[in-house]
Image (cartoon, rainbow, N blue to C red):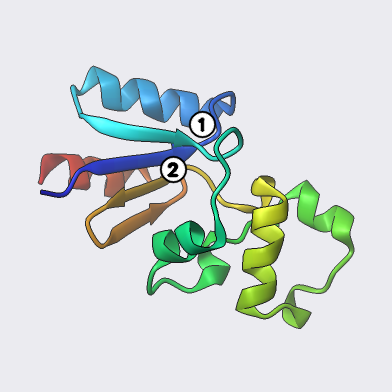
């Protein structure tokens, strides 16, 4: 049986609000703060699955801007390595249910997932 997995940053406001919303709706989920419990390369690649790595990579993050790297110069492997080194480069929250991955706080998609 599939279960809802919630990946985020415990102190980040959007993650706190979403966690509270899931709890209020009595949704059972497993949570992982990937700042405290960092992903291995295999875990991150499995989480991303068939989705383009660029959808999970937070290129608008101040952490990325500080690197002074052109996004177009990065391969998917480069992005994965950077996300492993700096978790702020991973968009959050991430919600995994079965093969479905919701990237970011997409309320409509999350609500539809909960209803199913």
The answer to whether marks 2 and 1 mark residues whose Cβ atoms lie closer than 8 Å is yes
Seen at 16% across and 49% down, the residue is 2
Q: Element type at marker 1?
A: helix
**In the rendered view, would you say 105 is above or below 90?**
above
The residue that label 2 is drawn on is 105
Which of the numbered marks, if any, corresponds to residue 44?
Answer: none
Closer to us: 45 or 12:
45
Q: In the image, residue 35 lies at what x, y percent?
A: 61, 37
Which residue is more in the foreground, 109 or 20? 20
- Residue at 37% in and 39% down: 6
* Among numbered discs 2 and 1, the one appearing first in the sequence: 1
On screen, residue 109 versus residue 48, left or right, reads left
**Mark 1 Cα shell of 10 Å, populated few (<14), some (14-19), many (≥20):** some
* Residue on which disc 1 sits: 14
53 left or right, relative to 3: right
Measure how far apart labels 2 and 1 are at the Cα level.
7 Å
Q: Quadrant of residue 38?
A: top right
In this rendering, is residue 73 above or below 16?
below
């Amino acid at each position: 049986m599939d279960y809802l997995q919630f990946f985020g940053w415990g102190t980040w406001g959007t993650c706190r609000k979403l966690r509270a919303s899931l709890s209020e709706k009595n949704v059972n989920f497993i949570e992982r703060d990937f700042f405290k419990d960092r992903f291995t390369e295999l875990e991150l690649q499995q989480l991303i699955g068939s989705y383009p790595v660029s959808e999970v990579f937070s290129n608008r993050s101040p952490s990325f801007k500080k690197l002074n790297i052109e996004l177009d110069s990065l391969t998917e492997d480069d992005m994965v390595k950077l996300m492993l080194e700096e978790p702020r480069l991973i968009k959050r929250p991430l919600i995994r249910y079965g093969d479905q991955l919701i990237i970011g706080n997409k309320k409509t998609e999350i609500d539809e997932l909960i209803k199913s």
